[in-house]
Amino acid sequence: MKELSPTSHLEMEEKDKTFLDATELTLNMGPQHPSTHGVLRVILKLDGEKILGTECVIGYLHRGVEKIAENRTYAMFNPYVDRMDYVAAVSNGLGYCEAVERLLNVEAPPRANYIRVILTELNRIASHQLWLGTHALDIGAITPVFYCFRDREEILKIFEKYCGARLTTHAFRIGGCQYETYEGFEKEVLKFCDFVDPKIDEYEELLTHNRIWVERTKGVGVITGDECKALGVTGPVLRGSGVKWDLRKAQPYAVYKNFEFEIPTGQNGDTYDRYLVRVAEMRQSLRIIRQAVGGIPEGPIMAKIPKVLKPPVGEVYHSIEAPKGELGYFIVSDGSTQPYRVRVRPPSFVNLQALDLMCRGQLVADVIAVIGTLDIVLGEVDR
Amino acid sequence: MADETKPSGTTPESQAPAKPTPPAKPAGPVPVAWDSELVGRFRRLYGSGIREASTYLGQNYLVADASIVYDVLSMLRDEEEFDYCVDVTAVHYPQRELPFEVIYILYSFAHNQRMRVKTQIADGGGVPSVVPLWPTANWLEREVYDMFGIRFEGHPDLKRILLPDGWKGHPLRKDYGIIQQDKEWVQINLGIESGQ
């Protein structure tokens, strides 16, 4: 357990000195706080309601995933990656499987890649829905959480039918997919797309022009594109600041180059723009899913790989565009059955670093909005 | 785990694929020299300070001496537009003379290019912090320090990040005993014998 000492190492700039000689207040938020989305502790330095600085205390959920990997075979480690970003387990699995495949120099067959894209994009929608529901709830809008969870349920049902699990799916295997799609999979996915399309309009009706929502999110937690790059912030946060960068386009993996879709971007880099970006991303994901279901080829779903995986000596870095940003795996092989080192580059961990910059000068209530808009999952921050 | 039943089932099978694999292995990819204008420039500047420049599986990497790695990275940022430091991490090779390898994964938005810069350091050694170049390295370097005990000189706030402040040892070192650590922790904190 972390020691709960209120020591802080924040440096304050001259201009941030307290107003009217008021005493500076240190306020502890979390780790048991409903709107920190898990066990995140933030030490806030306040001048009245104004934030002078924040410091994150993390690690409460640390399970030593990277150490576990060194003591498992490549295939045995596969289910563990689902437990990092547990609301987007499919993306985690895709990144890991592709990284090992690169190391093995094999490629998943086209049909497997199409199944992968369909499930990953469904997972992106599910992740964004969960984000939207809880983020809106934090800010005070009660309804979206019910709408989002209701619709996300349909995605989880598809996952359950496909691989038996709803959250920690372990949907993919190194070399392809373990399971062939079930009877009527394509039809069901298309039905879901038609079902959720008008639902996204519903979310927008509830929020986009809602006066309270706009007041609480516009101009809150502003970060510029250059600041994002310097802080390594990726995903919808980077795109919300106007940088048109998405790994699915920049360095296409799986079969993303076969599909037409756009990268939605914002302009102001505030919480409102990031909301718009994520909602637009859900629509783009639907577009990809529709194309993928339409063009899904016949054929094998598993590449020819040996029973015992022994990648040649070497190292590889492979990253994908997870719902939260760039998720990378750096794997070092020593030629044995177990990885010598697995490094996970988690988007949530890196993005959370921007919290301090985004919160300075804002009000305490805005910290909640900013934590929400960063869309962190503590399982991935702490690993 | 089922040691008695396994051999009868697995030996004929594992022998069969074991034979064709050795000749198949050399056909796999090997690192090839990475020749580019950039590497040439670095070699002219630093000579043998650049130990290696290779491409493996289409990914470029550069191995530089720890003494010049900061200059190399700062040149890469300022002149080659590698404006995004994707990751800072390390690997422990206890059998090597310089057992720790620190790896910087860089990306350039302008050129849509990735590369890795690696440097090797001794046990107890350190490398200059790259926080002045990329603020994102702050937490990444803290994590490397937490997990490997590598010191980043000039880091603004080098302390543990994922593990508690009083934690003993650095878990991602190869000589770190997980079972022993677990036994100790259970005994001290729970007052019972660990089941491990």
Image: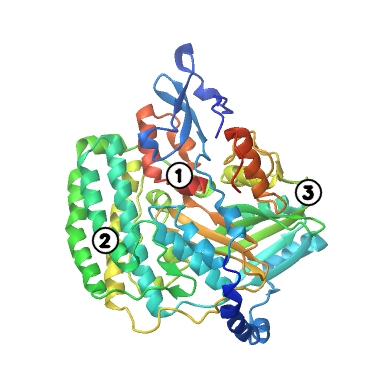
Question: As shown in the figure, which amino acid type bears the numbered disc 2?
Answer: Lys
Give the chain of mark 2.
A
Q: Point out the residue furthest to the front here.
A: B4
Indicate which disc residue A157 carries: 2
Element on which disc 2 rests: helix
The part of the image, by quadrant, that contains residue A32 is top left
Give the chain of mark 3.
B
Give B195 or A144, whichever is nearer the viewer.
B195
Residue A288 against residue A297 in the figure, above or below: above
Q: How many marks?
A: 3
Give the chain of mark 1.
A
The residue sitting at 33% across, 70% down in the picture is: A260
Indicate which disc residue A378 carries: 1
Residue that label 3 marks:
B123
Report, in whole angstroms, how far the alpha carbon at label 1 lies from the one at label 3.
32 Å
Q: Position of residue A104 (x, y in %)?
A: 58, 74
Residue B14 against residue B153 in the figure, above or below: below
The residue sitting at 45% across, 59% down in the picture is: A92
